Image (tube, rainbow, N blue to C red):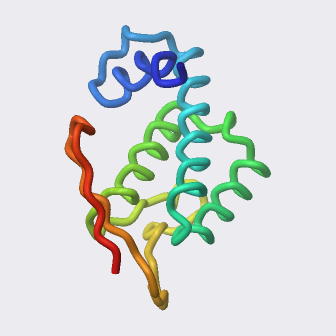
């Protein structure tokens, strides 16, 4: 249901189709998407625990709704960069955070699981180490 409600916002965010949704609703949907991403990072990426704390503190104290549409768009895109399977970090300096937000230093990983999934979700395999 959420994804269906966010369809026009993602269309505008990722494809630049400004007529897909008006600015007021677009801003509301972007705020919802940011909250959702932070919630998923907290649930699915325990390695980013300290970053989640920083994000929650920033958004709770400074209120996500004070951000401009451009800042909300940048926040989402930068969080997506941080979660990709490569070494990029998110540049959240405009939010008062680091320009290398999500960089993992001095972390010992004792147990991990790599999940290989097809783009369609039809098959999946796991490797643990």
Q: Is 82 situated above or below 119?
A: below
Residue 62 on image: x %, y % = 74, 48
In the depicted view, which residue is nearer to us: 68 or 118?
Answer: 118
Is residue 21 depicted above or below 70 in this figure?
A: above
Residue 17's quadrant in the figure? top left
The answer to whether 108 is drawn above or below residue 70 in the figure is: below
Which residue is drawn at the image coordinates 68% and 34% (left, top)?
65
Q: Could you say which is closer to the camera, residue 124 or residue 45? A: 124
Kindly indicate the quadrant of the structure image that contains residue 56.
bottom right
- Looking at the image, which is closer to me, 58 or 43? 43
> What percent of the width, then of the height, locates residue 98?
52, 68
Quarter location, residue 42: bottom right
Give the x, y percent position of residue 50.
62, 71
Q: Is residue 94 left or right of residue 78?
A: right
Q: Residue at x 57, y 40 (%)?
A: 36
Q: Quadrant of the C terminus?
A: bottom left
Residue 70 is left or right of residue 84, and the answer is right
Residue 46 % position (x, y): 55, 67
Mark count: 0
Q: Residue at x 45, y 67 (%)?
A: 99
């Amino acid at each position: 249901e959420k994804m269906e409600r966010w369809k026009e916002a993602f269309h505008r965010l990722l494809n630049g189709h400004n007529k897909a949704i008006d600015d007021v609703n677009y801003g509301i949907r972007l705020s919802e998407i940011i909250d959702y991403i932070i919630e998923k990072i907290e649930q699915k990426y325990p390695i980013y625990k300290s970053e989640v704390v920083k994000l929650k503190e920033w958004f709770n104290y400074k209120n996500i709704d004070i951000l401009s549409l451009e800042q909300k768009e940048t926040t989402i895109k930068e969080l997506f960069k941080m979660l990709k399977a490569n070494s990029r970090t998110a540049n959240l300096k405009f939010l008062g955070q680091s320009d290398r937000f999500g960089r993992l230093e001095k972390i010992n990983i004792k147990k991990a699981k790599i999940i290989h999934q097809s783009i369609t979700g039809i098959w999946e395999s796991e490797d643990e180490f």
